[in-house]
Image (tube, grey):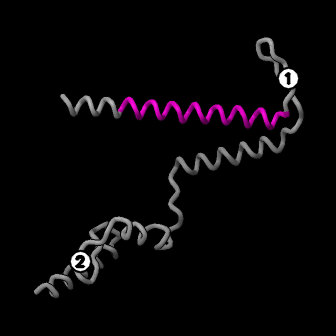
């Protein structure tokens, strides 16, 4: 009887996979496969490409544009800030400002996630 159940489960799983529906992947024994095994069988493994999200595409585009800008702007610039005055290559200044902006963006995200996590914990206590 268990051999028949395993065969039925395998056929159902094959039908799900043909339709592209994420059903539980079954081995020949009829037991569900682990999440890692299912993930390795989808997406890039099936030849559908890397599956980059919108954020990754935007980040790669931004980095590419930043590199082009830095390569094209190599002259030195004089910077005055409060009582300091110094000369830097424009590409270095651009890189430093982009790095500072990325760190601020990351830091704000960490603060936001922390506040949301704290609020969820508080809601669970209530």
Circle number at residue 47: none
Please tell me whether residue 77 belongs to the stretch shown in magenta: no
**Mark 1, residue position:** 86
Is residue 63 toward the left or the right of residue 121 in the image? right
Residue 22: percent from left, percent from top: 31, 66
Q: Is residue 82 above or below residue 91?
A: above
Q: CA distance from mark 2 to mark 1?
A: 70 Å
Depth check: 27 or 43 in front? Answer: 27
Q: Main secondary structure of the magenta part?
A: helix
Q: Is residue 40 above or below residue 85?
A: below
**Mark 2, residue position:** 12
Please give the range of residues in magenta: 89-116
Is residue 69 toward the left or the right of residue 77 in the image? left
Residue 94: percent from left, percent from top: 75, 34
State the SS at label 1: strand
Displayed quadrant of residue 70: top right
């Amino acid at each position: 009887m268990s051999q028949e159940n395993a065969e039925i489960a395998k056929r159902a799983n094959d039908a799900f996979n043909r339709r592209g529906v994420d059903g539980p992947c079954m081995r020949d024994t009829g037991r569900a496969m682990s999440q890692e095994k299912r993930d390795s069988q989808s997406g890039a493994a099936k030849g559908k490409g890397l599956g980059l999200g919108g954020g990754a595409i935007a980040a790669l585009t931004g980095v590419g544009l930043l590199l082009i800008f830095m390569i094209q702007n190599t002259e030195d610039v004089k910077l005055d800030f409060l009582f300091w005055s110094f000369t830097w290559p424009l590409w270095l200044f651009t890189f430093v400002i982009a790095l500072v902006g990325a760190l601020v963006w990351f830091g704000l995200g960490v603060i936001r996630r922390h506040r949301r996590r704290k609020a969820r914990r508080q809601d669970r206590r209530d």
